[in-house]
Image (cartoon, grey):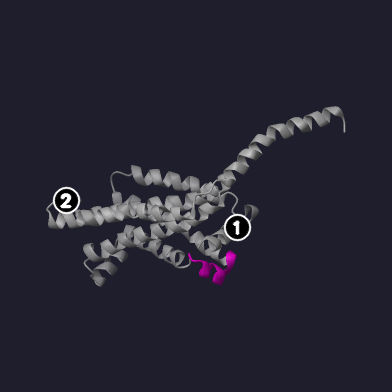
Amino acid sequence: MTEHSTAAASTQLKQTAPSIQHSARARKFKLPAWVKYPVIVVSLIPAAWIFFALWSDLTRNTRFLGANPVKEMEHFMGEWNIRFLVLTLAVSPLIKLTGWGWLIRYRRIFGLLAFFYIFCHLSIYFVLDVELDGALLVEDVSKRLYITLGMAGFLLLVPLAITSTKGWIKRLGNKRWNALHWLIFPAVVLGLIHYYMAVKRDIREPLFYALIFAVLFWFRLRKPRESGIGNRESKRVARSA
């Protein structure tokens, strides 16, 4: 090896050393496991607020929910479902960028919170909007396209919520579990179309969320098999569940 090549190699090592050290420091950063509990509590505040607002409007004649409280509650819960879906899908890119594998426990938490809010959204619709009328529910789902799409998106999320535990990962195996959880992508697409059709006039928020999801989808879909990312993530979920 010549002096020139030796000097070049030495210079390259000096240039890469700071980035390696920075990467190592980044990977050492880790939030304590107990942080997930206040995260869950804070995440449930919107739901607590909306039910308090309903109670206040009914018992104290306030107007927190406006002239159409049922629709306001439905839209509120639906929007929070979308926000938690954003957080759920953002976890994998963050792990990839930072090396913080411990973030995977928050993907499960955010995913279950997203399911909780969509379940509340549909419960409000079924109990307060169609008033537990099964025939009216069937008519709505069959005749109103945006409700059909929203219901289909919800049904796609049900198996994801059920199989989010360590036990289900072991039963299904990493490969099948990862394949099943790709259902989140068509569920999000159906949810966004439902949201777009439901708001009718002001479509800025649906388009804003669609842009965010497009970026997250691109990140996830560009190299879905790269370095066995899916298997590593399912193993992390199993360890953190």
Nearest the viewer among 148 and 17 is: 17
Structural crowding at the residue carrying mark 1, measured as other residues with C-alpha within 10 Å and reported as few (<14), some (14–19) or many (≥20): few
User: Where on the picture, by quarter, is residue 17?
Assistant: top right
Rendered image: mark on residue 67: 2
Q: Which label lies toward us, 2 or 1?
A: 1
Counting from the top left corner in percent of width and height, residue 83 is at 39, 50
Is residue 30 shown left or right of residue 207? right
Residue 64: give its label.
none
| Residue 234 falls in image quadrant | bottom right
Label 1 belongs to which residue?
232
Residue 212 percent across, percent down from the top left: 44, 45
Q: Which residues are magenta?
A: 164-175
Q: In the shown orientation, is residue 48 left or right of residue 96?
A: left
Q: Residue at x 16, y 54 (%)?
A: 57
Q: In the depicted view, which residue is nearer to us: 187 or 232?
A: 232
Spot occupied by residue 59 in the image (x, y as percentages of width and height): 13, 57
Relative horizontal placement of residue 173, taking residue 213 as reference (left or right): right
> What is the tally of numbered marks visible in this picture?
2
- C-alpha separation, residue under disc 2 versus residue under disc 1: 49 Å
Vertical placement of residue 75 versus 128, above or below:
above
At x 27% / y 67%, what residue is drawn? Answer: 137
Question: Quick one: label 2 or label 1, which is nearer the N terminus?
Answer: 2
Q: Secondary structure at mark 2?
A: loop
Amino acid bearing label 1 = Arg
Q: Is residue 166 visible?
A: yes
Q: Position of residue 146 (x, y in %)?
A: 33, 57
Residue found farthest to the top: 4
